Image (cartoon, rainbow, N blue to C red):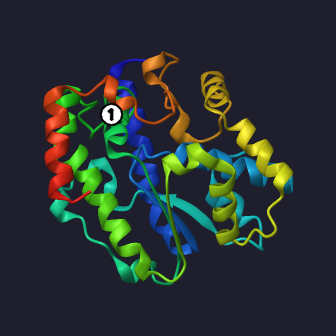
Amino acid sequence: MSDFLNRVQSYSRYLLRTYTKKHRDKKSELLIISYPKSGRTWLRMLLCRYLSQKYMLKNDLDLFRMTSKLNHLLISDFQHEQANHRLKLNPSELKFNHDKYQHKRVVFLSRDPRDTAVSMYFQLKNRETVDVSGYYQGTLSELYQDPRFGLEKIVAFNKMWTDNITSLEHQLCFTYEDMLNDAEHVVSLILGLMGEYPVDLKALQEAVNYSRFDNMKKLEKKGEINHFSMKTADKAETNTKVRKGGSGGYVDYLSQDDLQYTAQVFKQYNV
């Protein structure tokens, strides 16, 4: 597929999401918030696979659509809020909107910001356009140190949420690394917040096994994952959404200058 068609396809998906976002936000009773590339594709598959197995639903990755079919569950959806890269917000422009969330249940997912930034680079370099002009053309270091897309914005976004989420009555805060350590426990807590009780342990175990990274990569390559976010222009390894999984992979990509910049940002935000 030509670069031009790739840009058109990526931007069309963005416009579709923007068009439906307001309706879904208003109707959703539980929102799962995260910065992009923090592990929500994995979490999405875990939750949706559980629901499909437990309630004999079509295997789907649209949590909003699935929970809308189950009356005992809160209608739930994923959201990046102000972290969408096309907004190109600087860290100082991020604002926590308490009124928007005070009557909803909220789950916040974060990930080591160094891994998040590296993953974001590959996303914007190979899969998703920065804007209508096309894919990101700079180096990893340039994106990593760019306040609109890189480390500082991720750190600021995560800190804003972890500092403010406790002001909400019904909330849950966890990390991608928590999921790596015990995915069953994390998913069971989220299911409970959604209204699923008791959790079916057999369906949960099957969902965890099904959502292993090696299986997710196979499913993506075969085009068997039914969700717009998993559509790829081709099957090249650099264009796959599911890359490696795991934690700490940033060490293979960051330069000494990037690491020094990291220390400065961490000190600035006291993290």
Q: Toward the viewer: 231 or 125?
A: 125
Tell me residue 4's x, y (percent).
33, 24
| Residue at image mark 1 | 118
Q: Quadrant of residue 75?
A: bottom right
Tell me residue 260's x, y (percent).
14, 37
Q: Is residue 198 left or right of residue 92?
A: right
Q: Is residue 118 left or right of residue 106?
A: left
Q: Which residue lies at the image location 23% right of the left edge and 28% below the top edge?
A: 140
Q: Indicate the amino acid at tag 1.
A: Val
Is any part of residue 203 visible from this angle? yes
Does 237 appear above or below 212? above
**SS at mark 1?**
helix
How packed mark 1 is, by other alpha carbons closer than 10 Å (few <14, some 14-19, many 20 or more), is many
Q: Which residue lies at the image location 65% right of the left edge and 35% below the top edge?
A: 225
Q: How many marks?
A: 1
Q: Quadrant of residue 220?
A: top right
Q: Which residue lies at the image location 33% right of the left edge and 52% below the top edge?
A: 84
Q: Toward the viewer: 243 or 62?
A: 243
